[in-house]
Amino acid sequence: MIYIRVSVAREEMISPELQEHQCRGLVDREGLMLVRAPLMDLGKSGRGFSDRQIAEIIAMAERGEFEVLVLWVWSRFGRNTLESLKNLDRLTELGIEVRAAKEDFDGRTVIGRFAIRQMLNIAELFSDQLSETWKETIASRRRRGLPHANQGRFGYYRCDTCPPKRRGVALETCRDCRVGVLKVDPVFGPLLADAYERAANGGNLGYLVREWHAAGVVDPVTGLPVSAGRLYDVLDSGFGLGFVRYRLPEQLHKLVPDRAGVPRKKRNRSRRPEEFGLYLPGQHEPVIGDRARCEDVWDRYTARRGKAPKRAAIEDRHEARYSVSGLMGCPHCGVSMQPLLRAKKNRRPPVGGRPHPGDVTWRCRTHAEFGTCPESGYGNLEHVEERIVSWLEQRATPPADLEQRITRARQSVPVAVPVRASPASVLAELDRQEDNLANAVSVGAISIEAARRKQEKITAGRLEAQEKLAEEHRTAAVHKAGQKMSAASFLGVRAEWELASPSQRNRLLRTVVKQVLVRRGRGTPLSEKYEIAPAWVA
């Protein structure tokens, strides 16, 4: 199996395609066979392990799903020597051989393990040096009244002549804009000022977002329509009111419990105002000309923002909140649907400490944010679960003619099928022939020329067998994906449904359900309103 990691997309990065190409080269040279597509962590730092797929790799190794893990270089596994060695030792205990395409040391030898430790130490040293450089750069920008990042900002532009900032491409700057002070955009600046005023006065930003969408306002930084979440991120930064914000040292990280409930240190990625201890005057001009008025607007905005309910960050959630989380979809625009709780004064008593299913409504995300999907419907969690249970019971019931099918199968005469050697057995036989050939050459029982011809035949046979074996794996994967599940699969999900928690129900459903599409129509029969797409549907 191949593992690929890229920390940040930038022009000088080693792309995932290049890493995969060199890893596949090692696989081909060693005669290995890939058991699955490469496992990738894109946009993930090597200093941490909790948010990467290393735990999944170890779990796969415990299940015996692969025997060799191939990396591009050792730093792709991690830039924290202690944690890297701990996870590598665990893989070694499970009998997994770890190889690096460009730094291929034999980890089973003393010298090989020493070389691997040195490469991991070098990777950590490089990461530490880079971290120190960034800390000095950020401190310098803070002293000069500049934001810590150099990307574009909504409501501002950099220069009249330089090209805009593009993801993964070095920023081009002229002499006038090299200092990094942004200018108020004559089009988007007034829009941002109006948004601050309306938010500070208690206005509904959802209505404002719909107004912008109807007027064709597009975020010049992302090139996408401005959603309510994106607008809150812009307003929370305080940049439009003339501030630059920084976290205090104690705010850079926070303790978050993992799946086992053990507190783990994670980078604080919350963007709410209370998560930043320093809001300093910046060099740029605010979108509201009077700075005293800007401070008044900011105080009123943060006071109202502090009263808003705080939701757990997505990366901090380890369990699905509802049984159908991530499965509900709109059949008209194709986007996922989002849950909405009924107003508190109209809610029914909770069930098991959770909201009553009748109080949870699912709606189209596009229509909720922009109002542009009028044909979308609303789904009620209580009705959705009722429909799912009915669907499971229908498929868990064995066919009426099951006994007749079994009788016919027993009475049928088996047809003799010629047995062919499997590609795996052919490869084993070719390995045996190659060993015998090497022994024959060593004792002089065969000439070099004859051995060369025999070796060419063995090599050609091995390539053919490897192609057939790979084709068998592809065919088996396609067959498994397209094969309808038996009644026992649905019966198992139905049997565990009643006692399962919402997150457990969600995991059970994902084994048999791909998506639940919600049609429009109050009073429509549940079998017509909720269309369930099975997991085997492409």
Image (cartoon, helix red, strand yellow):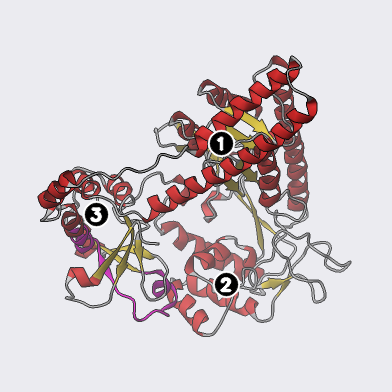
Residue shown at the point (37%, 64%) measured from the top left? 338
Percent x, y of residue 79: 67, 34
Residue furthest to the right:
175
The answer to which of 458 and 126 lies nearer the viewer is: 458
Quadrant placement of the N terminus: top right
Q: CA distance from mark 3 to mark 2?
A: 34 Å
Q: Amino acid at mark 2?
A: Leu
In the rendered view, would you say 522 is above or below 14?
below
- The answer to whether the residue labelled 2 contacts the one labelled 1, judged by CB atoms less than 8 Å apart, is no
- Kindly tell me whether residue 352 is visible in this rendering: no
Q: Secondary structure at mark 1?
A: loop
Q: Residue 467 magenta-drawn?
A: no
The three-letter amino acid code for the residue at tag 3 is Pro
Type of residue at label 1?
A: Phe
Label 2: how many Cα within 10 Å (few below 14, some 14–19, many 20+)? few
Residue visible at 74% across and 36% down in the picture: 102
Between discs 1 and 3, the one toward the N terminus = 1
Name the side, left or right, on which 515 lies relative to 137: left
Disc number at residue 355?
Answer: 3
* Residue at x 43%, y 48% (from the top left corner): 476
Q: CA distance from mark 1 to mark 3?
A: 34 Å
In the picture of the structure, the residue carrying the numbered disc 2 is 224
- What residue did someone put label 1 on? 49
Q: Secondary structure at mark 2?
A: loop
